[in-house]
Amino acid sequence: LLHCPFLVLQTKGELLAGKETSVIVEFTNPLKQTLENVTLRLEGPGMLRTIKKQFGRIPMNSTLTWEVKFTPMRPGLRKLIASLNSDALRHVYGELNVQIQKP
């Protein structure tokens, strides 16, 4: 691989303390093979507990999209961090700084 693959994170809608929102984690498989035993992990200190999800397989050039709903409880600057591991590709990361507003 010429470049290290990464995860793209984006939030939907306003980020208000005490109001449910969601984050979308996206990953496109850059390899010329199917990724097997894919596990995604998402964490957001101060916003959501660590969540792990098994995805099994991602065919080459396919894009995986995972939406996670959460309710941030406190306003302020926070960070969402996602990571992906599989048999052929490990330690793929993405992160997003988010500003949680007061309601």
Image (tube, rainbow, N blue to C red):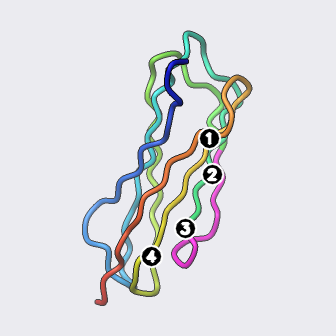
Question: In terms of sequence position, does the residue under pointer 4 or pointer 3 come before the other?
Answer: 3
Q: Quadrant of residue 55?
A: top right
| Circle nearer the viewer, 4 or 1 | 1
Which quadrant, please, contains the C terminus? bottom left
Which residue is pictured at 48% across the width and 41% down the height?
Answer: 7
Q: In this view, does 11 lie to the left or right of 27?
A: left
Q: How crowded is mark 2: few (under 14 residues within 10 Å), some or many (20 or more)?
A: some
Measuring from the top left, give residue 18's x and y in whole percent.
39, 85
Question: In terms of sequence position, does the residue under pointer 1 or pointer 3 come before the other?
Answer: 3
Q: Which amino acid does label 1 sit on?
A: Leu
Judged from this view, the residue extending furthest toward the front is 2
User: What mark, if any, has residue 84 been given in the picture?
Assistant: 1
Extent of the magenta region: 45-53
Mark 4 sits on what residue? 71
Question: In terms of sequence position, does the residue under pointer 4 or pointer 1 come before the other?
Answer: 4
Can residue 63 be found in the magenta stretch? no
Label 1 element class? strand
Which residue is pictured at 64% across the width and 64% down the height?
Answer: 50
Mark 2 sits on what residue? 41
Measuring from the top left, give residue 2's x and y in whole percent.
51, 19
Which residue is pictured at 60% across the width and 16% down the height?
Answer: 34
Where 2 sits versus 37, above or below?
Answer: above
Judged from this view, the residue extending furthest toward the top is 32
Mark 3 sits on what residue? 44
Can residue 47 be found in the magenta stretch? yes
Q: Quadrant of residue 37?
A: top right
Residues at badges 2 and 1 in contact (C-beta under 8 Å)?
A: yes
